[in-house]
Image (tube, grey):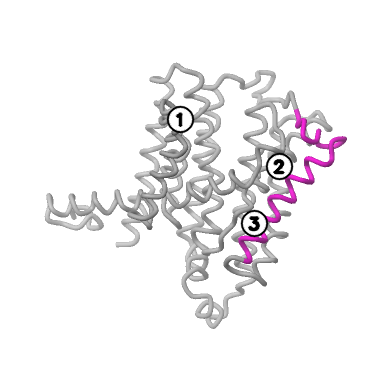
């Protein structure tokens, strides 16, 4: 049953990616394409956050700091070496490994609200460090004219070209996250969330597992940051604030904690919904926050889980068989 549900979740995600591949055919407005590009970047960040907060149950409110270090490491690498942005991705991955190791160790000593405060401190420290080193990072003025990705001598600059490139990145990131979540390590991560003592008694190295979770999450975050820097062409520290970290947690909660497929829909909903509500003028943020709050109250396991549960009940009522059986 679990294997069938696992495959069905993969099929569901593949279907979403296929639909995503056809969206640019119907969207002619560059602004809407820009929103979709942000959705894809956010999906990768939230896929990583899901390993820490969703699977291992450790609240991380410093994701903006991870995202910022990925953006700055790639942008600064390409600026000072004059090498291709593709190598900047490698610099971002290395930065992600270092962050994962650095943030993973505090998680061995503190939990709950204390870990949340630690990650908030990390995010703010990164932002202030970038702001106060103008000779190296550009300080509050940021970094301008960041080179876009290229294929040979051709630079990928249009919104649609960037969209398809990011769609490939997102598909790869999703498949990696899906494989890990349904592997031995994914099961251990979930066990850490549910019963740490039982995992410890079984002989599993808890310290190593937590550090692995933080490292994987950080790599996802820094790669997404690098994508963002070379997509926008300009970055500054004010972008990477606590509000951004909170937004990523909201995306994860809307999609459902621990749900790999849910990260796709949670990221899409929280990124697109505010844009759809802008016609309300100054009230759009109040309406958006109200919708999210009501969703958290009535669908504590996530909107995707609620929608899936409703679909399964309808399927069972119509066919007389459970969804997991797939009609067999």
Sequence-first disc among 1 and 2? 2
Would you place residue 319 above or below residue 159 in this image? below
Q: CA distance from mark 3 to mark 1?
A: 32 Å
Magenta stretch encompasses residue 116? yes
| Mark 2: secondary structure | helix
Would you place residue 224 above or below residue 278 in this image? below
Examine the residues drawn in magenta and state their main secondary structure.
helix
Mark 3 against mark 1, which lies toward the viewer? Answer: 1
Could you tell me residue 216's position as x and y percent? Answer: 61, 54
Q: CA distance from mark 1 to mark 2?
A: 33 Å
Q: Which residues are magenta?
A: 114-143
Which residue is found at the position 69% from the left and 33% from the top?
86
Q: In this figure, which residue is indicated by the disc labeled 1?
A: 275
Would you place residue 239 above or below residue 66 in this image? above
Sequence-first disc among 2 and 3? 2
Could you tell me residue 321's position as x and y percent? Answer: 15, 57
Q: Residue furthest top?
A: 28
Mark 2 against mark 3, which lies toward the viewer? Answer: 3
Q: Are marks 3 and 1 in contact (CB under 8 Å)?
A: no
Q: Residues within 10 Å of mark 2 (few under 14, many from 20)?
A: some
Could you tell me residue 263's position as x and y percent? Answer: 46, 47
Which residue is found at the position 31% from the left and 52% from the top?
306
Sequence-first disc among 3 and 1? 3
Could you tell me residue 53's position as x and y percent? Answer: 53, 59
Which residue is found at the position 33% from the left and 50% from the top?
8
Would you place residue 17 above or below residue 149 in this image? below
Q: CA distance from mark 2 to mark 3?
A: 15 Å
Image quadrant of residue 281?
top left
Pick the quarter of the image with the N terminus.
Answer: bottom left
Badge number at residue 215 = 3
Pick the quarter of the image with the C terminus.
Answer: bottom left
| Mark 3: secondary structure | helix
């Amino acid at each position: 049953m679990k294997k069938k549900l696992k495959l069905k979740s993969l099929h569901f995600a593949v279907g979403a990616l296929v639909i995503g591949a056809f969206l640019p055919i119907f969207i002619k407005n560059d602004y809407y394409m820009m929103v979709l590009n942000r959705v894809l970047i956010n999906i990768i960040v939230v896929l990583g956050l899901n390993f820490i907060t969703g699977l291992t149950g450790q609240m991380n409110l410093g994701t903006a700091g991870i995202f910022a270090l990925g953006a700055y490491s790639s942008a600064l690498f390409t600026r000072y070496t004059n090498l291709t942005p593709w190598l900047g991705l490698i610099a971002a991955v290395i930065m992600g490994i270092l962050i994962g190791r650095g943030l993973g160790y505090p998680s061995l000593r503190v939990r709950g609200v204390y870990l949340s405060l630690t990650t908030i401190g990390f995010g703010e420290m990164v932002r202030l460090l970038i702001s106060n080193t103008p000779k190296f990072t550009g300080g509050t003025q940021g970094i301008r004219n960041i080179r876009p990705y290229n294929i040979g001598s051709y630079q990928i600059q249009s919104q649609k070209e960037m969209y398809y490139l990011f769609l490939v990145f997102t598909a790869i990131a999703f498949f990696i996250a899906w494989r890990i979540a349904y592997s031995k390590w994914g099961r251990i991560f979930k066990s850490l969330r549910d019963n740490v003592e039982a995992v410890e008694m079984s002989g599993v190295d808890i310290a190593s597992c937590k550090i692995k979770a933080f490292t994987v999450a950080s790599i996802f975050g820094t790669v997404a940051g690098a994508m963002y820097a070379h997509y926008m062409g300009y970055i500054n520290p004010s972008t990477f604030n606590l509000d951004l970290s909170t937004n990523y947690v909201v995306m994860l909660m809307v999609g459902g904690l621990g749900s790999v497929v849910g990260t796709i829909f949670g990221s899409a909903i929280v990124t697109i919904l505010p844009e759809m509500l802008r016609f309300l003028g100054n009230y759009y943020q109040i309406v958006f926050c109200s919708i999210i709050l009501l969703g958290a109250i009535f669908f504590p396991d996530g909107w995707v889980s609620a929608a899936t549960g409703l679909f399964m009940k309808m399927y069972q009522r119509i066919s007389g068989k459970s969804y997991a059986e797939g009609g067999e």
